[in-house]
Image: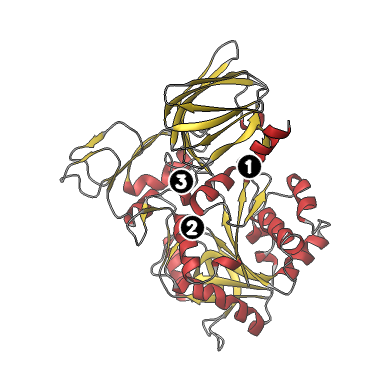
Amino acid sequence: MKLVLLSGGSGKRLWPLSNDSRSKQFLKVLQSPAGEPESMVQRVWRQLQETGMAESSYLATGRSQVEMIQSQLGAEVPIIVEPERRDTFPAIALTAAYLYSVAGVSPSETVAILPVDPYVEASFFDTVVQLEATMEQSGANLALMGVVPELASEKYGYIIPTSDEAAASGYLQVSHFQEKPDRVQAEELISKGALWNCGVFAFRLGYLLDILQRKGLPLNYEELQKQYKLLASISFDYEVVEKEEKIVVQPYAGFWKDLGTWNTLTEEMSSNHVGKGFVTADSEGTCLINELDIPITVIGAKDLIIAASPDGILVTHKAESPRIKEVLKSFEQRPMYEERRWGHYKVIDYVKYDEGNEVLTKRIFIAEGKNISYQLHHKRSEIWTIVSGEASIVLNEKMHNVKAGDVVRIPEGTKHAILALTDVEFIEVQTGSELVEEDNIRITLDWKDIALHQFIS
């Protein structure tokens, strides 16, 4: 059995800590058993390792999240990359093509799909594994996992079985689905044995490959990547699940929680105060999360969420926090903080002048032994001012060592890279006509290849 974790999200529901590149699953606001800050994706991957399932697991994500995943889970974690953000059907179709044509997975193998950010206990994964046996025993084409509801929630979709009489192994035949009902409808559905839809389901790989062939889509991963933008942006639920007749659901009665909003996330945080600042004792129920270098003081304010990052500042009543996605639906800006495989950066300032010239200033941290890829830019020049640490840099095949206080000028078209000999921080000032990710022309990624390129050239 293969497990695939879907990692996506637009980064709106937990703004300003989340953004287009740092979705909610990457926020280190939980606590590991060792007492260290931990993100949702780190928590889930740790649980998979503890249950022995990580070796048969993959992450499917867009290009913008690859470096964040590598930063938090390591460079060796298997990643299936979407060329652009679509919806869950294109993502799962691409995953199927990868498993078949790249990983060599047999069409008879069971594949389980689950979100990357469920907040669950270990028994959750036992039920995921059970889906394979459920499919064999039921003869179904799809086997879903449904959470036994604790209350009549309006936040989740529901899976409604044909009856509440389970088969010997505990699975139920599925009748239909209901998207986020009101409370009265939810109570009625629960009385009929309905389960929360937690986004977990399984199928045989060949089942999805047949669907791709019927649609005239290639089964080769690289070929499907080339055609990816032609695929309809539609959810797997709408495109496949709701059209399938042979479908069952396996109930899960253990702990499960969706940490998709500020009020649910803060319920599971170990502290109500993260970062610089003060929260007075009479600010009952208030949570402060501050990623800025300036303190925030909260006095006598109850049941609030105050979150601050380079992307912005949020002040909201806990009960109203789910409205953030609607409020920000037309708000767009470049991510002001990103984690990368080599470290992280914060945007300090960005200006676009009337004549069209842009200036972007970043504070960049590179961990010891890590490097930025050997690259060049056609539309911008850069100036690096080393703030702390020591590093080796390559400029057009020539190696130099730099330390705190040194200034490096990188004109347009200059091939360049940097390797941190110790932890390094520097200020980067970009100046040009178009400061976009597409202008990062990467030549090679590994420092050994950079050094080889240097000596050969």
Q: Distance between the residues labelled 3 and 2?
A: 14 Å
Disc 2 is placed on an element classified as loop
How far from the left and from the top, in percent, is residue 333? 52, 31
* Left or right: 245 in relation to 5: right
Question: As rendered, which of 277 and 261 lies closer to the eye?
Answer: 277
**Residue at point 61%, 81% (across, down):** 133
How far from the left and from the top, in percent, is residue 436? 61, 28
Which circle, 3 or 2, is nearer the viewer?
2
Q: Name the residue under label 2.
A: 117
Q: Can residue 148 be seen in this view?
A: no
Which image quarter: residue 450?
A: top right
Q: Can residue 326 be seen in this view?
A: yes
Labels 3 and 1 touching (C-beta < 8 A)? no
How far from the left and from the top, in percent, is residue 198? 51, 64
**Residue at point 82%, 62% (across, down):** 213
Q: Name the residue under label 1.
A: 448
Whether 385 is drawn above or below 148: the answer is above
Q: What residue type is labelled 1?
A: Lys
How far from the left and from the top, in percent, is residue 132? 62, 77
Disc 1 is placed on an element classified as helix
Q: Quadrant of the N terminus?
A: bottom right
The numbered dot on residue 106 is none
Residue sitting farthest toward the top: 355
**Residue at point 60%, 25% (across, down):** 435
* Left or right: 450 in relation to 128: right
Q: Which of marks 3 and 2 is nearer the N terminus?
A: 3
* Left or right: 220 in relation to 412: right
The numbered dot on residue 13 is 3
Disc 3 is placed on an element classified as loop
Question: As rendered, which of 197 and 437 lies closer to the eye?
Answer: 437
Q: Which of marks 1 and 2 is nearer the N terminus?
A: 2
